[in-house]
Amino acid sequence: MINKTILKKQGILNEIENYIRVLIKNKINPLDIITKKSIDNAFILDLAMGGSTNTILHTLALAYEAGIKYSLKRINYLSRKTPNVCKVSPSRPEIHVEDVDRVGGIASILKAVVRFSKSPVWLKEKTVNGQTIDDYLKKSPEPDGDVIRVGKNAFSQKGGLVVLYGNLAPDGAVVKTTGVDKTMMKFIGKAICFNSQEEALTAILERKIKNNAVVVIRFEGPKGGPGMQEMLSPTSAIKGLGIKVALITDGRFSGGTRGLCIGHVSPEAAAGGPIAIIKNGDKIMIDMQKSKIDLLVSEKEFKERMKKIKPFIPKVMGGWLGRYSQHVMSANYGAIMDNVIL
C-alpha cells in the first residue's frame, strides 16, 4: 500500500494528483499513450542509459496487455541505432540517478539521442502531460557532456542492452552490455549447471566456481520458479569474490547486476528449452558483437539431447500459483499468461 504521508512530505503526492488532473482534463486514456511507437521510445531511452534488463520483460508484458504485437528482435534493431550516452551505478559507480536528474534527466538523455544519432525516436507521440515528445524535449536542458554524453564521446555507439540468439536461446536471451567488461565481449567457457538459485549460490560461496566457467542456473524462469526469481544473490557473490565467469539463466536480474550475466533465456528449461540439456563441462560460446549464444556440441548430439528432455513437474501444483505455473509463457513474451480461461 502507498504511504500517502510519506509521498506528501516528499512533494510527490501533489505531483501525481496534478498529472491525474491533466489526464482527465485532456481526456487522455492509457491507449492514447501506449502505442508501438511509444514503446519504441521507451526502449530507446532504456538502451541510451543502459537500464535494467527487467524493463524489457515488463514492457513486453505491457505491450501484450495493450494488444500491441511487439517482437523482441526489434530491440536489437533499435540498439544498433541508439548510442549508450549515460551510465549510472553500478556500471559507473560514481554516478547515480540523482546526478542524472540534476543535469536534465530523461529529457536530456533523449535530446542527446535525437540530436546526435540516427536513433528513430518518434517525436509526435503523446506524453502524460499532454505534450508531444518534441514539445517536451524543446524545454529540456542540453546534455552536459559528462553524465550525459553526446556524439563520439558516448560510451558506445550501440545501446546498453542486447538480445542474444542461438541454439541455446532460439527465442532470445537478454544481457546488459554496459555492465560487461570489454575483455569478455566474446567468451567461451565450460558449463557448471544448477537447477536452482540456492544450489548455485552455495557452490559460489564455497568457492567451487573457478575463473572462465559458465554458471548455468535453470528452472528459475516464469514457469519453473514459478515466478522468475531475481538472481541478485549469485551475481553479487560472483562480483564479491572477483571471479571471471559468465552466468546464464532463464531467471532474471536486478538493475544492480554487473558482469557477463545473461538472463531471460527463452524458451525456459521448464518449457523444454535447450538450457535444460546443458551438461557439466559443455562449452558455451557468447559473442556480444554478433548477438550470439551457442552450446558447442554437434547438431546430432544437440537433437538427441532435446529428444530426451523429461516433462517438467511444477514445484507448486495447487492454488493460483499452480495455475500460473501451468499457463505462464516464457520471458520473450514478457512472462504473460496464455489467456486460457481457468
Image (cartoon, rainbow, N blue to C red):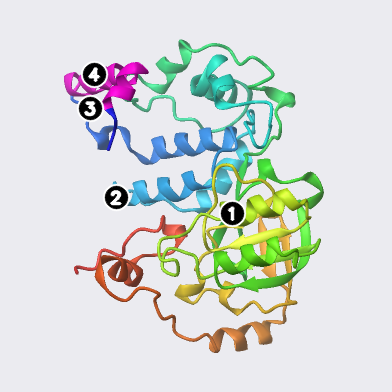
Which of the two labelled residues, at mark 1 and mark 2, occupies the earlier sequence position? Answer: 2
Which of the two labelled residues, at mark 1 and mark 4, occupies the earlier sequence position? Answer: 4
Mark 1 vs mark 2, CA separation in Å: 31 Å
**Residue 288 in sight in this render:** no
Which quadrant of the view contains residue 4?
Answer: top left
Query: Disc number at residue 28?
Result: 3
Mark 4 vs mark 3, CA separation in Å: 8 Å
Contact (Cβ within 8 Å) of mark 4 with mark 3:
yes
Amino acid at pointer 2: Glu
In the image, is residue 10 part of the stretch drawn in magenta? yes
**Residue 17 in sight in this render:** yes
Which of the two labelled residues, at mark 2 and mark 3, occupies the earlier sequence position? Answer: 3
Contact (Cβ within 8 Å) of mark 1 with mark 4:
no
Q: Residue at x 75, y 63 (%)?
A: 207
In the depicted structure, whether residue 116 falls above or below residue 170 = above
Q: Quadrant of the N terminus?
A: top left
Report the front residue among 130 and 104: 104
Contact (Cβ within 8 Å) of mark 4 with mark 2:
no
Q: Residue at label 4?
A: 22
Tell which tag, 1 or 4, sits nearer the viewer: 1
Mark 4 vs mark 2, CA separation in Å: 24 Å
Secondary structure under badge 2? helix
Query: Disc number at residue 65?
Result: 2
Q: Residue at label 1?
A: 233
10 relative to 254 in the view: left or right: left
Which of the two labelled residues, at mark 4 and mark 2, occupies the earlier sequence position? Answer: 4
Amino acid at pointer 3: Ile
Callout 2 environment at 10 Å: few (<14), some (14 to 19), or many (20+)? few
* View extreme (front): residue: 206
